[in-house]
Image (cartoon, rainbow, N blue to C red):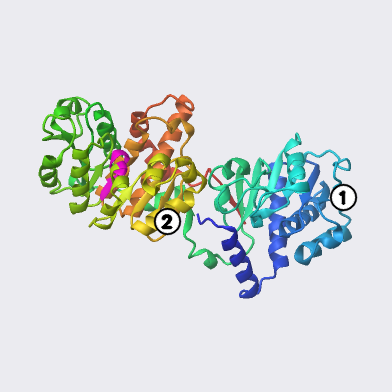
Amino acid sequence: MKLGTREILQKIDNTTIDKYGIPGLILMENAGRAVSNVIIKEFPEAIDIAIFCGSGNNGGDGFVAARHLMKRGRNVTCYITKNPGEYKADAGANLQALVKAGGNTVKLNSTFSNFTSCELAVDAIFGTGLDREVKGQYRKIIGFINGLVCPTLSIDMPSGVDANNGNILGVSVVADLTVTFVIPKIGISVYPGADYAGRLYIADISTPSILEKEIEYELLTFSGCRSLLRNRDSNSHKGTYGHLLTVAGSTGKSGAAYLCSLGAARAGTGLVTSAIPETLSSAMEQKTAEIMTEPVYDAGKGHFCPESLDIVKEMCSGKTAIATGPGLSTTEETSEFLLKLIQQSEIPVVADADAINIIAKNPGVLKKVKQPLILTPHPGEMARLCNTGSGDIQKDRIGYSRDFAVRHKVFLILKGARTIIATPEGKLYFNPTGNPGMASGGMGDVLTGMVAGFLSQRYTPEEACILAVFLHGLAGDIVASEYGDFGYLASEVADTLPEAARLIRETYEEPFFEIIH
C-alpha cells in the first residue's frame, strides 16, 4: 500500500484536475460522500452530528458529508471557524450548496457557548496541508473536540498531525476513526501520529491510480508479503533453501548467537551453521540440535580475533549469506576481525548490534564492501552510525533512515515502533506489525537471523527485509494475543514464525485498514 506526503497528495490532486480533467468539486464530492458512508456504517445510532469545518478543502469535505448525512436522516450542525464569506473556491461552493439545502451552520464563538450536544464529532479542520504549530483559536477548538464525551472521526488526517512525519504540531485531535483519501499519509502510519488516527478507512475518490506508481513510500501489508512469500516445491531438499553462516557470540553472550541462528532456522533456512568462539562452543552445542556449530580459534579469550578470520572465510564456502553482530563484543581484536570480514565477504552480510557499533567507529568500511549489506540498528545504534543522539533519531526516523541508506548504498532496518526499511535507492517501507511486548532482549537477534535466513534462501535484500520485518512483528502479535502485552520471550516469537507465515498465506482482509470505493 503506497503512502503519501502532503506534497505527493497535492501533486496527485493537481494532476487529476489539470491533466485528467476531473474537477476539484468532483473530488470533494466523492470525499464527502465517502465520509458519510463510513459514518452510516460505523455509527448507525448517531443522529446528532457536529462537523467542525476549517476554511480550506478539509472543511469543504465536511460540508459535502453534512449534505449527504442530512439526506439520510441525520441532524447535522456544521461549526465553521471563519465567517461564511471567507470560505472560497470549492469549499465556499459546497458551503453555499449546504446552506441552500437547508443545512445548519454556526460560527463558533470564542467560548463555545453556542455549541449544542452531539453523538458524533467530525474533525474537518486542517487535513493534510498543516505544516506549522497549531495556535490561537484553532488550538482551543481542538482541545474542545478532545474534551467531548462522544466518538470522534477525522477527515483525511487528525487535525494537528503532520502528514509527512507523524509529529504533533502542538496539539492534535484524537480520533477514534480516520477516513483518509487516495492513499494513507505517512503521518498516520508512524508514531506518534498513528496513535491519534484510530482505525483507518481509505477512500477512493476517483484520482487515477497511475499517479501513485512512482511513489517511494509503502506500508507493508498481508497481500504484499503474500505475493513475496514463495511456495515450496515438492521436489526440493534442504540445500534448496540456502545455508546461512552466523558469526556471533562472545563470553556471556552465547544466547544472542543462538537466538540469531534460531530466527534463521524458523524462517525456513535450509541449513544454519553457527561460527562461535571455541571457548563457547560446548555451551552453544547444548542449546540446539538443529543448528550446526563450528568452533573458531579465539586464543582462549572468548571472542573473535584477527586469527579467526581465515577460519571463518573458509567456512563461507558453500554458504549463501552471513549474519553477524549479536553478542559479538567490540574489543579491538574483534573489531579488526569484523571489519576485514565485511570487506572481504563474497556473500551478502546482515550486520546488527556490536557489528553496527564497530562500523559506527569505522564508517569508511561501508565504501569497501563487495556484496549487499543490510544493517539492522535500534535507535541508539542508529545514533552512533549518524554521530548524533537517539532523541534526534526518534524525531526524524524517516529522514535519518533514508539519508543513511542512500548515502552509503546499504539496506537499513531502523527498528522500533513502526519499523522503517530504507533501500539504497531511497525507497521506504513502514511496518504495521509488532507490539510493545517485543521491547525486550533478544528480539533483534531473532530478526537479524530472519533477514539473513531469507537472504540465504535467495530472496533479494529488499524482499528479505520486508518479509523478515513483517513476519517478526506478526509473530510477536500472535504471541501477545495468547500471553498478553509483556513477559514473553524472543525464542517464543521465533518459534511462532511458521504460524505467522501460515497466517500471511491465509489472510485476505487487511486488519490495519479498510478500503472503500
Indicate left or right for 116 with 342 as reference: right
Residue 137 location in percent, x, y? Answer: 78, 47
The stretch of residues the image draws in magenta is 349-357
Q: Position of residue 502 (x, y in %)?
A: 38, 40
Quadrant for residue 131, please give it: bottom right
Say what amino acid the circle numbered 2 marks.
Answer: Asp
Alpha carbons under labels 2 and 1: distance apart:
47 Å
Q: Is residue 389 left or right of residue 371?
A: right
- Pointer 1: what residue? 106
Disc marking residue 403: 2
Is residue 179 among what the camera can see? yes
Front of the two marks 2 and 1: 2
Count the marks.
2
The residue under the point 84% across, 38% down is 117
Label 1: how many Cα within 10 Å (few below 14, some 14–19, many 20+):
some
Name the secondary structure under disc 1.
strand
Q: Using the image, tell me which numbered label, if any, was put on residue 510.
A: none
* Residue 207 in view, yes or no: no
Identify which residue, 33 or 301, lies in the foreground: 301
